[in-house]
Structure formats: C-alpha cells, structure tokens
Image: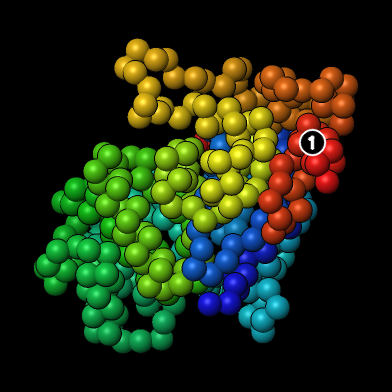
Amino acid sequence: MADRTSLAVRDLAVEFRSEQGVVRALDGVSFDLHAGRTLGVVGESGCGKSVTARSILRIVDRPGRITAGRMILDPGTPREVDLAQLDPESKEMRGVRGGRVGLIFQEPMTALSVHYTVGNQIMEAVLQHADISKAEAQNRAIELLREVGIPRPETRISAYPFELSGGLRQRVGIAMALAGDPEIVIADEPTTALDVTTQAQILSLLRRLQEEKNIALMLITHDMGVIAEMADEVAVMYLGRVVEFAPVEEVFSEPRHPYTRALLRAVPSILATPRQRLSTIGGAVPHPGARPSGCPFHPRCSEQLGALCTEQSPRPVPPGRSGAACFKVDQSEAVTA
Ligand SMILES: Nc1ncnc2c1ncn2[C@@H]1O[C@H](COP(=O)(O)OP(=O)(O)OP(=O)(O)O)[C@@H](O)[C@H]1O
C-alpha cells in the first residue's frame, strides 16, 4: 500500500505564559504520521508528549498557546488543512476532533460521563460526525462495541461506565475514539492504568483495529516495552524537542542519542537477576521554564563534548529521516560519511 502521510507536523512551538514567566513546552517539534503505521512517542514525564497530542486536537489547556509551526492534516489532498490555523472552537475543528482524529485517554473516564449509559455516549459521538438516524446510530454503537471486543454488546450498551471493569472501560474509550471513523488515532498512555494482562489485550486490540482500518496511530508512552511491541517508527522527546527519530528496530539495535540509550538502560531486562538494580537516568528533567543553554540534555549527558554542547543547540532531526539532535552523533556520522 502507498505510504500516505496523514499528518505533517512542522516546527511546532507551544508556550505557557504566566506571571512566573514563559514555559516553552514544545520547542520546534516535527514529525509525520502515516496511514496504517504507528508512531511511538516516548520520553520521561514533562517532555511534551501530551502537549503535542493536545495541540493536534487544539485542546491545549489555558494559558497554553501555539506560537509557531504547522500541523497539516491530509497534506497534498483536497482535504488538506493546517490545524494550527483553525479556531479551536470552530465547526471545522470540532469536525476534526473526534471525527478525522480520535483520541484515547489514559483514564477512559476522561472521555466518558458517569451520568449516561455507554450506549448513549457512543451514539452521541456517532451522531456528531454522521448524518444518520438515532436507530442507525444505536446499531453503529452496538457494532463498535462488538469491534472492540465487548461481549454481549446488545445488553452492554445499557451499562453505565462505573459498572464495567477498567479493561472494558478502556475498550469503550476506544469505541468512542472510533465513533467518528477517524483516519488518525492518538492514544495517550492508553494502558498505563491497567494490569499487565489487560494491557497486552488492549495493545493487541489497538493493533488489530489499526490494521483493519488503516489508521495512522500516534502512541504516547513512557514505556519502552510498549514501544518495542507496537511502534513502526519512534520519536524520542526531551524537553519539548524530538531528539531522536528512527524506525523501531534501529532505536533498539543502534540507538543514536545518549538520551535514548539512557532510556533503554532504564528498561528492566528479563535477563537481569532479581538483585540487579535498575539503571536510572542521572538527574531530573529540568523544568521547561529553566531550559539549559546549548543542548537541553547536556547537564545529564555522560558523553558531552564541552562548550559545543553547553553553548550551541544541535540541529533538529529533519522530518522523515532517521537521526538524532546531537553533536556527538553529527561528528561520528561526518567521520563515517
Ligand atoms: N496547564 C499547564 N500549565 C503550565 N504548564 C504546562 C501545562 N501543561 C503542560 N505544561 C508544561 O508542559 C510541559 C510538558 O508537559 P506534558 O504534559 O506534555 O508532558 P508529558 O511528556 O506528557 O508528561 P507525562 O508523561 O507526565 O504526561 C510540562 O513540563 C509543563 O511544564
């Protein structure tokens, strides 16, 4: 199948301004999402994963603001639109949110109300994006519940979310995300709140649905295990930047950025003995309001090259290409070129 780009994000910058100062949560983020493929977005807490997702859907919390960049949905087609230019409250953006782009939350109750049955809520979501009758929407809701593997969907549509287990609730969350027949689905830590067995089931469901519907999936996680299992390509984020981008095999077999290597060292290995301590990354992620000069990772980097890294900012990874924003990588690639 042709490699169709569903979304092209370029040089995206987001700032939160308050009396305490300006926090640059995203600092020139670029990547593409492709139909039928999964982009895994990984990084420690606070690196900008959720703000990236929320920017695409134009639901960044106040006082957050997109200050630069483009987010082109369906580039090069008659349906092309720059989401960064749309009014978040406009009809067009409401059609994108939950329609052309679906969102799966870590906690499904974020998307669900306790006051309505799951059937009513999915029907409502279907009706927002399709001009069909209520009876047709109800059939579609049952069909969606079946697609996400909910047993006896004809009776389950009458259940309230709190009557369902965490795993079934997340399946309903996925059904909600699919209600508008999206071409892109953004899943923000969709399995973090679940036990390991349920996590595996939900990931395999996501993979099956993605393949069947040729969805471009953006999967946000802090878990390298989830990345290994699900991603085709990986964007590693640090302090509001994509510091490495590569196909998943490359990220695991030859990680380029010192930060990616540190993340991989922090993953527990099945070969480790119970007493072997987990490697953790030294130091904490600085607050984006106090961004270090030069390469933002330099204060924690064991491989830094002195003034180059402390004073200058490495080039961002050009979208669509494998690479790392790192002077050491630039130097070693120059030597081998
Ligand atoms: N509502 C807000 N007000 C002020 N700053 C915010 C707000 N939301 C996010 N930020 C800033 O944006 C940065 C990135 O946040 P984001 O939630 O995208 O991180 P994340 O990588 O998704 O982390 P986590 O894994 O903990 O969800 C944060 O460090 C914070 O400084």
Does mark 1 have its CB less than 8 Å from ligand 1? no
The spot of residue 229 in percent (x, y) is 41, 49
Callout 1 amino acid: Ser
Pointer 1 residue: 332
Q: Quadrant of ligand 1?
A: top right
Q: Nearer the viewer, residue 295 or 256?
A: 256
Local SS, label 1:
helix
Residue drawn at (49%, 26%), measured in percent from left and top?
Answer: 266
Asked whether residue 13 appears in the rendered view, the answer is no
Q: Nearer the viewer, residue 232 or 53?
A: 232
In the image: residue 169, left or right of residue 127: left
Asked whether residue 164 appears in the rendered view, the answer is yes
> Is 168 placed above or below 50 here?
below
> Is 85 placed above or below 68 here?
below
The spot of residue 297 in percent (x, y) is 71, 28
Number of labelled discs? Answer: 1
Residue at the outermost top position = 275
Residue drawn at (16%, 60%), measured in percent from left and top?
Answer: 159
